[in-house]
Image (cartoon, rainbow, N blue to C red):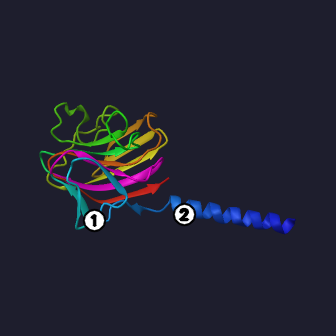
Amino acid sequence: MRRLAMLAMAIGLVGMFVQAEAAGKWAKLINGKNLNGWNQIGNANWKATGDMVEATDGSGFLVSVASYKDFELKAEFWVDDAANSGVFLRCQNRAEVTQGNSYEVNIYDKRPDPKYATGAIVDVAPPAQPMKAAGKWNTYEVTARGKHLVVVLNGVKTVDVEDAKFAEGPIGLQRTAGVVRFRKLEIRPL
């Protein structure tokens, strides 16, 4: 009986170690070769090219097959001056992604209402500092832990807010206007 209890405890410890190990590892979400792991909605012309995904026409999303709850996300992106894009978090409807059913970390330098332009979480938190992204490679670092959301753009914290509307869901990449490119998109579950 004691042997059985020791064996069960050892198996439990190994399981906890494996789970903790998996929680701490970064996983690549794009491979630049194909769109595996993503579903397309809308008519944006998403394609994998080189080490990135890109869209230059149409309007739509790439939506991750996997769903995420608490995580850190790193995304490198490049947009032109006309771009309207974003990284959507915890999407609630895989078939229709909107700022009303997900958190939209905006990439939209020329947004008509600049309150929620690049660096903001639309309808949740404006950026602490207005920033522009067009014409260069940028890095978003996003942390979602429970209701606490933090957005860092090019090393500058633009959002640090608590909001409990959406607890879990897939990631969405948006293209509505302009040239949009994403590379080195990685996620680490917390």
Pointer 2 residue: 21
Q: Callout 1 environment at 10 Å: few (<14), some (14 to 19), or many (20+)? A: some
Question: Please, which residue is most extreme toward the left here?
Answer: 81
In contact (CB < 8 Å): disc 1 and disc 2: no
Give the quadrant of the N terminus: bottom right
- Picture mark count: 2
Q: Given this view, does label 1 or label 2 mark the residue nearer the observer?
A: 1
Measured along the vertical axis of the image, is residue 138 above or below residue 165? below
What secondary structure is marked by label 2? helix
Given residues 176 and 149, the one toward you in this image is 176
Q: Callout 2 environment at 10 Å: few (<14), some (14 to 19), or many (20+)? A: few
The answer, for residue 174, to whether it is visible in the render is: no
Q: Residue at x 37, y 35 (%)?
A: 101
Residues rendered magenta in the picture: 57-79
Picture coordinates of residue 79, whole percent (x, y) = 18, 51
> Disc 2 residue type?
Glu
> Disc 1 residue type?
Gly
